[in-house]
Image (spheres, rainbow, N blue to C red):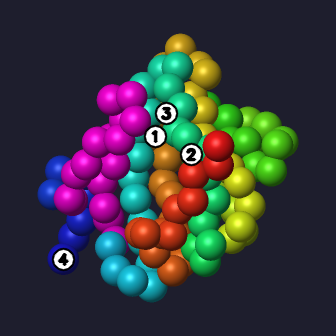
């Protein structure tokens, strides 16, 4: 079956951010996410999930183990398990990106205080 934001399972998170589950199973998760301007995710890590973040449009900043990396449209980066990370949108425009996780990150997230 064809999948898109229009027919995918939708959820909201954080400060008016959106997520659409494009693939959702125990072995693989692909989520299309949207962050409005000047929003941030909480810092966290995953015990098992390896993730790949890929920016579709806009500019995002991903802090990985204390280092900030700016991701422009059509750029991505991998985050290994047990590595603290946090996505920011410090720009004046929304950002859309994919988060690909294997295995699924559901129930695997540990918030860093």
Q: Nearer the viewer, residue 84 or 104?
A: 84
The residue identified by callout 2 is 55
Q: Name the residue under label 3.
A: 95
Image marks 1 and 3: residues in contact by CB distance under 8 Å: yes
Q: Residue tagged by mark 1? A: 96
Regarding residue 72, the answer to whether it shows in the image is: no
Question: Residue 27's spot in the image, x, y percent?
Answer: 45, 85
Distance, label 1 to label 2, CA atoms, is 6 Å
Say whether marks 1 and 2 touch (CB < 8 Å). yes
Which comes sooner in the sequence, label 4 or label 2? 4
Q: Mark 4 or mark 1, which is nearer the start of the sequence?
A: 4
What's the distance in space between the residues labelled 1 and 3, CA to CA? 4 Å
**Quadrant housing the N terminus:** bottom left
Q: Which of marks 1 and 2 is nearer the N terminus?
A: 2
For the C terminus, the quadrant is top right
Q: In this view, does 89 lie above or below 77?
A: above
The range drawn in magenta is 8-23
Residue occupied by mark 4: 1
Residue that protrudes farthest toward the bottom in the picture: 27
Instruction: Decide: is 88 above or below 113.
Output: above
In-image side of 53 versus 57 (left or right): right
Q: Residue furthest front?
A: 113
Q: Residues within 10 Å of mark 4 (few under 14, many from 20)?
A: few
Q: What element carries label 3?
A: strand
């Amino acid at each position: 079956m064809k999948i898109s934001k229009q027919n995918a399972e939708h959820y909201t998170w954080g400060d008016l951010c959106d997520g659409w589950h494009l693939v959702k199973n125990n072995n693989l998760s692909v989520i299309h996410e949207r962050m409005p301007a000047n929003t941030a995710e909480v810092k966290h890590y995953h015990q098992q999930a390896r993730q790949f973040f890929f920016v579709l449009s806009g500019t995002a900043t991903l802090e990985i183990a204390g280092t900030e990396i700016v991701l422009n449209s059509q750029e991505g980066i991998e985050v290994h398990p047990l590595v603290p990370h946090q996505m920011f949108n410090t720009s004046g425009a929304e950002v859309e990106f994919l988060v690909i996780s294997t295995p699924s990150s559901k129930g695997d997230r540990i918030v860093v205080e």
